[in-house]
Amino acid sequence: MYTSGERNRLRDKLIKAARADDRVTGAALTGSGALDAEDAWSDIDLAFKTAAPEPVLADFTALMYREHGARHHMDVVFERTVFRVFLLENTLQVDLAFWPEADFGATTPKFRLLFGTANEREQAPPPDARRLVDLAWLHALHARSSIARGRHWQAEYMIGRVRDHALALACVRHDLPAGEGRGLDLLPAAVTTPFEETLVRGLDDLGRAFRAVTGLLITEIERVDAELTGTLAPLLRALAS
């Protein structure tokens, strides 16, 4: 396990390396560090602006393995930006994003410019509530059919997906981050406590959990979309009956 001091020292070294590289024309602190919200478990998130992302990415990857204890990495691609995610031998996660110069800029509040200039970017919108509703009822259909077919593990997965989408609707309603569970622990207990009943306690508990999550999904639909309530609520109640 790493310490916060080790994390901060490595981040400083990476920023220093970026400043010394003429191909890197800007850098930003991203993630929780940009909001001064780090804790002992936070990782390193940095964004680099460059006209030639591929060679810079290759050189920083070599640096991570050669000098900073990287043992594995993976890539996440968003638009034209590559986020290379490193796993270090001390279990620290290091996310280095390599942005084309034309795209470099804040799309969320988690962006603090360190040097260079940033473009004005539109902030990423929250998930569309109707889309979350649609995904939820679709997974509810498959939960029901999986239970009926005796596909217990598939049913457990589908129930979980219904719960995920219903809780995401609650996050949208409370103006909280709705992706990857980031806003869930910020929801009021009055919202989250009832969802404890949707947790599957065993493969013989699927029907009860499905009825519970369907009821809470209906409640969230009623709160975010009155038009859909009249259409979907009766059908969802029939699904869970």
Image (spheres, grey):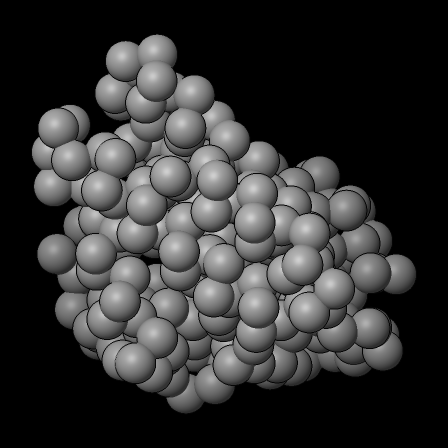
Residue shown at the point (88%, 61%) measured from the top left: 102
Taking the image as shown, residue 45 lies to the left or right of residue 196, namely right
Q: Position of residue 175 (x, y in %)?
A: 56, 81
Residue shown at the point (69%, 69%) measured from the top left: 226
| Front-most of residues 11 and 181 | 181
Q: Position of residue 166 (x, y in %)?
A: 47, 57
Identify the image quadrant of residue 3.
Answer: bottom left
| Front-most of residues 124 and 241 | 241
| Front-most of residues 67 and 140 | 140
- The N terminus, quarter of image: bottom left
- The C terminus, quarter of image: top left
Give the mark count: 0
Q: Is residue 230 above or below residue 136?
A: below
Q: Position of residue 79 (x, y in %)?
A: 77, 47
| Front-most of residues 80 and 219 | 219
Q: Is residue 194 above or below residue 212?
A: below
Q: Position of residue 86 (x, y in %)?
A: 40, 44
Q: Is residue 22 visible?
A: no
Residue shown at the point (35%, 63%) measured from the top left: 43
Residue shown at the point (46%, 36%) measured from the top left: 239
Q: Is residue 160 visible?
A: yes
